[in-house]
Amino acid sequence: NNRWVWSATFTIGSGWNVSWSPLNIHDDYGTGSLTLVADGNGNAAAAWTQTGQDGSSHNVYVAQYKLSSGFGFGQVVNNASHLMRTGLDIALNPQGLPMVAWCEWQLSINGSMIPSHIVSNRYRSDSGWTGPRTVFDSNIKIWMCKVGSASNQSVSLVWSEGDQENSQT
């Protein structure tokens, strides 16, 4: 069940250029929730979840793209724990630096849900990833979130929560 995250870049006049180096390690069980964001200055970032080798943890990875060097290798941006991580999204600030947000939750032994959380992490040019921060806690399952950046340095976050996966936002 190995899955890799690959990238390709399209340029006018040259067409598609496929990178033959994956953005993630190849020996994990699988990837999911893949998302990509780009700006008009040649910056981009890809984010995805990836199941650990033990099959019980889902990590959030981010790979940044720079016009001069292409995509870098994905970095884990969450804390180490055996939580489900889903519904992730990523945005770039006006300087082209990423902020990622995701939902995390865990089922108890009897199948009931332990509280959900929305967590975010942002990249700073002077210090790298700042570390995951809990944005919101809920006793209802949070299914997805979306993050967006504005030109004034503010970031907006919206999410969907409810008892079923198709709950309303």
Image (cartoon, rainbow, N blue to C red):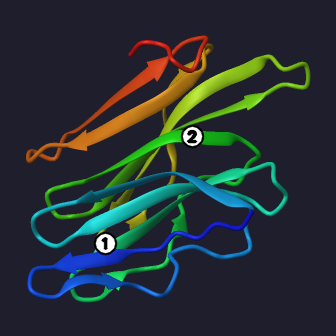
Give percent across and percent down for residue 90: 36, 50
Relative to residue 53, is residue 96 drawn left or right?
left
Check disc 1 and report the residue beneath it.
126
Residue 86 disc label: 2
Relative to residue 69, is residue 131 drawn left or right?
right
Relative to residue 130, is residue 110 drawn left or right?
right
Residue depicted at 57% across the width and 30% down the height: 117
Q: Are marks 1 and 2 in contact (CB under 8 Å)?
A: no
* Picture layout, residue 72 above or below residue 160: below
Give percent across and percent down for residue 147: 32, 39
Could you say which quadrant of the image residue 130 lies in? Answer: bottom left
Residue depicted at 51% across the width and 17% down the height: 166
Residue depicted at 32% across the width and 58% down the height: 98
Q: CA distance from mark 1 to mark 2?
A: 29 Å
Can you tell which of label 1 and label 2 is closer to the viewer?
2
Q: Disc 2 residue type?
A: Thr
